[in-house]
Image (spheres, rainbow, N blue to C red):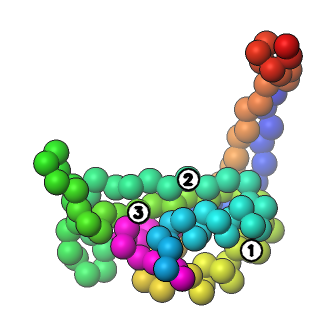
């Protein structure tokens, strides 16, 4: 089954060493999303990037940056994203938050897979 809806997407860019209350910021953000009932979030560790400081952070085959770029992507309804906004304002002290209106297309099975029916 295919369903389409209007949604918002947040993309949050920061460094791997950024923290919130002694946790990696990306872990704290994911935990906050779960606590607020956000539909889902994904964390990606970048292989290279730079931000406002123009410092290039990158990893190579032989070594990994100690402060690699991190991207957290969150997609949900505008109402759910609005619930998350106050937390983001407290938690993200350095970085970039991008909010976009998107068309979300969700694909789901009409029936459970055979292994789930047994």
Please name the residue shown 22% across and 76% down the image.
54
Q: Is residue 3 left or right of residue 60?
A: right
Please say if the residues under marks 2 and 3 sit with CB atoms less than 8 Å apart: no
Q: Earlier in the sequence, mark 1 or mark 2?
A: 2
Mark 3 element type: strand
Residue position marked by numbered label 2 in the rendering = 42
Instruction: Verify whether residue 19 appears in magenta.
Output: yes
Q: Which mark is residue 82?
A: 1
Instruction: Verify whether residue 56 appears in magenta.
Output: no
Mark 1 or mark 2, which is nearer to you?
2
**Total number of numbered labels?**
3
Please say if the residues under marks 1 and 2 sit with CB atoms less than 8 Å apart: no
Please name the residue shown 41% across and 71% down the image.
14
Q: Earlier in the sequence, mark 2 or mark 3?
A: 2
Quadrant in the rendering for residue 1: top right
Q: Which residues are magenta?
A: 12-21
Please name the residue shown 22% across and 56% down the image.
64
Please name the residue shown 77% across and 68% down the image.
36
Mark 1 element type: helix
Q: Which mark is residue 70?
A: 3
Q: Position of residue 3 (x, y in %)?
A: 80, 37
Asked whether 10 or 20 is in front, the reply is 20
On screen, residue 96 above or below 8: below
Please say if the residues under marks 3 and 1 sit with CB atoms less than 8 Å apart: no
Q: Earlier in the sequence, mark 3 or mark 1?
A: 3
Q: Is residue 40 left or right of residue 63?
A: right
Quadrant in the rendering for residue 49: bottom left
Mark 2 element type: strand
On screen, residue 105 above or below 39: above
Q: Is residue 43 left or right of residue 115?
A: left
């Amino acid at each position: 089954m295919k369903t389409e809806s209007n949604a918002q997407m947040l993309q949050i860019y920061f460094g791997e060493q950024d923290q919130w209350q002694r946790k990696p910021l990306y872990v704290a953000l994911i935990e906050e999303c779960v606590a607020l009932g956000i539909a889902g979030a994904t964390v990606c560790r970048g292989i290279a990037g730079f931000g406002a400081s123009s410092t290039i952070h990158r990893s190579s085959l032989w070594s990994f940056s100690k402060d690699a770029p991190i991207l957290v992507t969150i997609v949900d309804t505008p109402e759910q994203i609005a619930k998350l906004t106050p937390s983001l304002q407290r938690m993200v002290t350095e970085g970039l938050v991008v909010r976009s209106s998107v068309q979300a297309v969700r694909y789901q099975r009409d029936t459970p897979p055979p292994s789930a029916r047994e």
